Image (cartoon, helix red, strand yellow):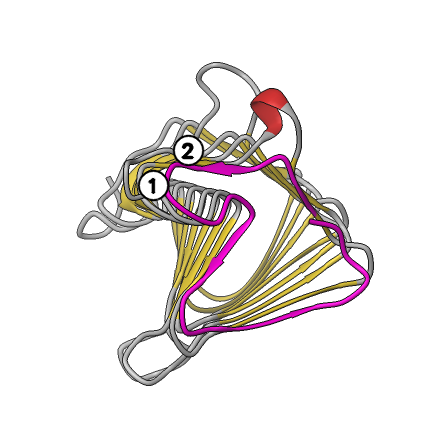
């Protein structure tokens, strides 16, 4: 469903505020639940579960063809869940896919839980995007390649910039984020060439695992700044 396979439930442009919504059980090529194109969107206390797509199981964020970027804020709410069938799933970006020039801001105890990607970015996949995460929880996400919770790479010359302040990524047992494939790197976070990861203000990355390297963080040609945080 959705326009040309975009946005299984919703295809959004312009300025939108969403509150206490539930989006579940949808499928599309991109944005199993929602596609956000050239939009300023705020989502407060929303739940997105059981959505599937090739890119962006729950949410796919992109700029317009003429270069208007999306700015998305997710406050509170849950992407995924702890139930056996709650996972959002995709090839890239099991929970959320964020594209070139766009900004994703997550805060106020937003949760990304139990999502799965067959390639990279079990929770969030960022490609030439800015991601700001403050006091949020990422747990139980999994990937068959790299970046169990977060995967950040550049798009052409546009790099990704990820900032994590406070909150917890991972945990014990089922709460761990995992990169399970034989080449799995970055059980919690994978950061690619030229990109930047900043962790501060008591951020925790704990208990995550990978099959190959970087149970917590794998950074290849990237800049990583960590202050007052726990790994």
| Left or right, 93 with reference to 103 | left
Q: Residue at x 41, y 33 (%)?
A: 88
| Disc ID at residue 32 | 1
Cα distance in 3D space between marks 1 and 2: 8 Å
Rendering coords of residue 169 (x, y %): 64, 43
Q: Are marks 1 and 2 in contact (CB under 8 Å)?
A: yes
- Dot 1, how many residues are within 10 Å of its Cα: few (below 14), some (14-19), or many (20+)? many
Q: Is residue 22 above or below residue 119?
A: above
- Residue found at the very far top of the displayed protein: 84
Q: Residue at x 57, y 22 (%)?
A: 174
**SS for dot 2:** loop
Rendering coords of residue 222 (x, y %): 47, 73
> Closer to the camera: disc 1 or disc 2?
2
Q: Which residues are magenta?
A: 205-231
Relative to the observer, which residue lies in front, 174 or 6? 174
Let me know if residue 223 is in the magenta part: yes
Q: Is residue 196 above or below residue 105?
A: below
**Quadrant into which the N terminus falls:** top left
Rendering coords of residue 41 (x, y %): 56, 62
Of mark 1 and mark 2, the one earlier in the sequence is 1
| Disc ID at residue 182 | none
Q: Is residue 218 visible?
A: yes
| Disc ID at residue 88 | 2
**SS for dot 1:** loop
Q: Residue at x 62, y 35 (%)?
A: 207
Relative to the observer, which residue lies in front, 225 or 46? 225
Residue 203, quarter of the rendered image: bottom right
């Amino acid at each position: 469903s959705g326009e040309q396979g975009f946005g299984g439930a919703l295809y959004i442009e312009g300025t939108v505020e969403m509150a206490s919504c539930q989006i579940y059980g949808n499928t599309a090529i991109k944005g199993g639940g929602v596609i956000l194109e050239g939009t300023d969107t705020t989502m407060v206390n929303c739940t997105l579960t059981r959505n599937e797509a090739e890119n962006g199981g729950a949410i796919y964020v992109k700029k317009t063809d003429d270069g208007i970027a999306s700015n998305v804020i997710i406050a509170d709410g849950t992407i995924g869940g702890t139930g056996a069938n709650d996972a959002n799933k995709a090839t890239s970006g099991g929970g959320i896919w964020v594209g070139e020039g766009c900004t994703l801001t997550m805060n106020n105890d937003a949760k990304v839980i139990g999502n799965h990607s067959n390639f990279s970015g079990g929770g969030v996949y960022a490609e030439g995007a800015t991601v700001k995460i403050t006091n949020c929880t990422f747990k139980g996400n999994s990937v068959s390649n790299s970046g169990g919770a977060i995967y950040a790479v550049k798009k052409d010359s546009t790099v990704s910039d990820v900032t994590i302040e406070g909150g917890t990524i991972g945990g014990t047992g089922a709460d761990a984020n995992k990169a399970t494939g034989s080449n799995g790197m970055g059980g919690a976070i994978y950061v690619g060439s030229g990109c930047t990861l900043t962790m501060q203000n008591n951020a925790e990355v704990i208990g995550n695992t990978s099959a190959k390297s970087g149970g917590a963080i794998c950074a290849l040609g990237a800049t990583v700044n960590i202050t007052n945080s726990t790994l």
